[in-house]
Amino acid sequence: MSSRSAMDDMKKVANSSCNDGLLLRMGLNDNKAGMQGLDKEKINKIIMEATKGSKFYENELKKDQQVNQRIEKMMQLKEKITAQQLLKAQLQVDKLVMELEQSRNLGSTIVHIDMDAFYAAVEMRDNPELKEKPIAVGSMSMLSTSNYHARRFGVRAAMPGFIAKRLCPHLTIVPLNFEKYGKVSKEVREILAEYDPNFMPMGLDEAYLNITEHLEERLNWPEDRRRFFFNTESTTGVDEDGMNMPAKFNEDEVSSSPVLFEDNTSLMDDDLQQRGPSVENSVVFGTSAEEVVKEIRFRIEQKTQLTASAGIAPNTMLAKMCSDRNKPNGQYRISPERQAVLDFLKDLPIRKVPGIGKVTEKMLKALGIVTCSELYQQRALLSLLFSEVSWRNFLDISLGLGSTHLEKDGERKSMSTERTFSEINTAEDQYSLCRELCRDLAQELQKEGLKGKTVTLKLKNVNFEVKTRASTVLSSVSTEEEIFTVAKDLLGTEIDSVAPHPLRIRLMGVRVSGFLTEEEKKYQQKSITSFLKSGKEIGFLRLQTSEKSNQEYFTKNLEAPHRGSFFDQKRAARQLNSGNISPNKSKGKQLIPDDKSSANFVEETKKVTDLQNSSVCTVFTCPVCFEKQSSNSLEELNRHIDECLSGMCLKDTVEISKNDSSRENTPSFPPQFKNEYVDKCQKNKTHQLAGTDQSAIISDSSANNSTEKFGQIIPDKSPRERQPGNLSDIARNMCMKQCLFPKRISEDNEDGFDKTEHTEGTSSSCFFEAKEDSVLVCPVCNSEQKTTNLVSFNRHVDVCLNKGLIQELAEKEDFPTKIYNVENSNRVFSGGLSKGQQYTNPSQGTKRSGVTASQSVSKKAKSSNSKHTIEMFFK
DNA sequence: CGGATCGAC
DNA sequence: CTATGTCGATCCG
């Protein structure tokens, strides 16, 4: 039972204006040691007193009401269900049940290992002073876990320390020490790996193993291979520091005893006797699954002096529930027979099922469902009240179905970081905090080489109300600046929304999701490769700024006819190919490459290389003005392009503004250009559905054009982002040529590339912000892009361009696939996941929690540090 | 897609 | 004296 459910009980008490008093004091009940404890009512009363009236509690009540409303809605729905509908559903569901039953697989042996009160156990092991005391690990704000002694007082994981103190004034609260837990965890994992090299850790203190293979091999093992020795050192209780250690902590119902295992199912004294003639101080384990797991637990305890509980079952869901059965320091097995599974589930409360939490439990309870067999009985009804995914999951649960193998790490879907702190209410602090979060997140993203398209800002105000605001940009972000650019926008909107009141928050988080698919990554890789070569390998590259190794330049010329714009060509190519285009089978594949143009590209590129190598005068097509240029050197060509660009800049300024041309740094839109722009937009109108095809030339651009507003276009500044972006640069400049884009203004940015580092501060003026809710029309795909800033709009354009161009390139087989980092050309970015990373397991039953050990460690450590830094804001 | 919600540890 | 976390997934509109 968690503190949350204690809280729920309290709500009931409060809501029914219940009596207080009546506090049974029991202490001596089932507790041989005479250990003091509190009964449930008393616990609830104390929790209530501590919590009542707090903002937190108010919010809990509110959330509760929302759940109640959901339930009410569901009940109304239920009322409308006719007998006939139900019957039909019953038939359909039962058909599915038959299928599921047929596919039932009892052939695997899955083990779930769960360390008992892990953090607390480690702390007690390492500090004998704590041995007999009630302790919890965490802080005054939040506890991670407690030992079994403290649990008698109702002190549990996820309970704030200050409340725990009221429940148990003698409680010792030990601060978290993730490094230590990580070490111990590693020791345990080393053992587990021997039984299943592909075992699946779930956090620091849990793991799934598939021991099916091990069991087979083990049958042929000689006894000696199954013999393990008692570690006399650890059982006499001396650890490295020479401190006296108890072999186990034990404050539980189970009396402490010197036997190996205390639970009913594991080794007993006579059990040990039966193990036959044994070498002194050793024990031999059998070949059954139970024996294997006993062996594992034995070895864990010998090695770490910590106990673990375990479950053995034909699938992960059942194994997990089994490990809970004889906790602590026990194990349980469901034998691989259908009936055994069903017996196990029969009276099992649904809440015990992984994946069914507080809310689901309550909803099902409203339908009279508490146990798994009731869940099965109501399968028809559930199929009418819940989503497909939900009720099918319910069905799997009630049949005892789950994953029978440990799935490979899936791909991570998002990454985030968040922090709780004492109230922050000034915009300045909020922005700098936001930046800090972005920085941390960017670091983590970079570790895994991930870039995402959606940035989500999460805020929790001082009333514990949580808000999330998301914005998806069309080119992936990964650096601090990129993320912050989007996040600060979202934050600004929120600050504005409560103005003139300050935004009073106690938590802020930033998340990036919408990672590139493997497909998209490939394209990126290829594009990077083709456009970025490091060091001497410079093919057709030019140093953007001499100081920086930020080499980038146009590596692609577009084929003639040079008269048409890039977009015209694009459109033409598309039309040409439209016959072959199968309607978007999958995202990011919309564009069939134009063989002709890509062939042409390769040719041109070759010319470039030739130029480089032979210094023969060659003719190029300038990507800006589309004039043929003959030159002897790259320098000369570059100079031409520079001139071209700077010439463009002046005359190609475009801005469509509302009436507020006075907005600083936002030049007003010359009427003639405006007309041209609008014309352009209108010409391109079609009936194609916007959004269904990124690269569609066509889309409806009618809405709100008159309120459009452009600001400065600035390319993304991050080198990493820039690498694949050369095409975009070309295209952007082409856009300028087309007078579709506003001009960039800053003199620092004459060539359109931001050379300056972003500096601290929230008002970095590296780009202009469009008025909120601007709708810009992408000159590539002509679709309307709602945006609050130009950076995101630029990204969209980048993507549009990249999609078309990169895919052309991708078709060329001989494209190298290595990726070079400009900043460090030794490093190769690979899209692959490294070991120990998060993943999503799509199959039922096994859902891995988000973070690896090390991530958790660093994040939590950061979290506590940051609290201080934040508090310093207020002095 | 964006936002809220759920569940896990 | 105060004081209730952090992550990823999924569902719903």
Image (cartoon, coloured by chain):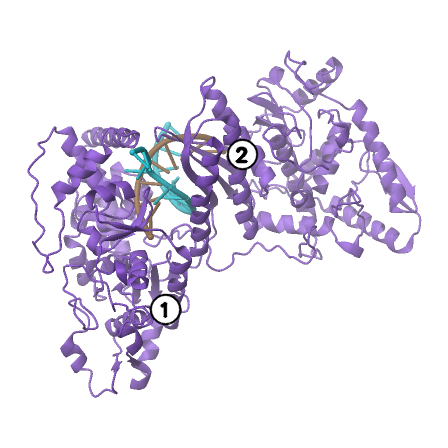
Chain colours: A purple, B brown, C cyan
Query: What residue lies at 51% left-to-right and 58% top-to-bottom?
Result: A834
Q: Residue A55 falls in which quadrant of the image?
A: top left
N-term-proximal mark, 2 vs 1: 1
Residue A28: percent from left, percent from top: 7, 54
Query: What amino acid is found at the position of numbered circle 2 in the picture?
Result: Ser
The correct choice, above or below, for A308 with respect to A819 in the image is: below
The residue indicated by pointer 2 is: A432
Q: Nearer the viewer, residue A860 or A785?
A: A860
Residue A187: percent from left, percent from top: 39, 67
Question: Are dots 2 and 1 on a single chain?
Answer: yes
The correct choice, above or below, for A534 with respect to A164 in the image is: below
The disc at residue A241 is 1
Q: Residue furthest top?
A: A659
Q: Residue A579 falls in which quadrant of the image?
A: top right
User: Label 1 marks which chain's residue?
Assistant: A
Query: Callout 2: few (<14), some (14-19), or many (20+) C-alpha neighbours within 10 Å?
Result: some
Task: Report if residue A88 is visible in the image.
Answer: no
Task: Report if residue A308 is visible in the image.
Answer: yes
Residue A245: percent from left, percent from top: 28, 68
Query: What residue lies at 26% left-to-right and 79% top-to-bottom?
Result: A285
Query: What residue lies at 72% left-to-right and 51% top-to-bottom?
Result: A530
Task: Say what secondary structure mark 1 lies in.
Answer: loop
Query: What amino acid is found at the position of numbered circle 1 in the picture?
Result: Asp
Residue A603: percent from left, percent from top: 81, 50
Q: Residue A272 falls in which quadrant of the image?
A: bottom left
Label 2 to label 1: alpha-carbon separation: 44 Å
Query: Callout 1: few (<14), some (14-19), or many (20+) C-alpha neighbours within 10 Å?
Result: few
The disc at residue A107 is none
Task: Say what secondary structure mark 2 lies in.
Answer: helix
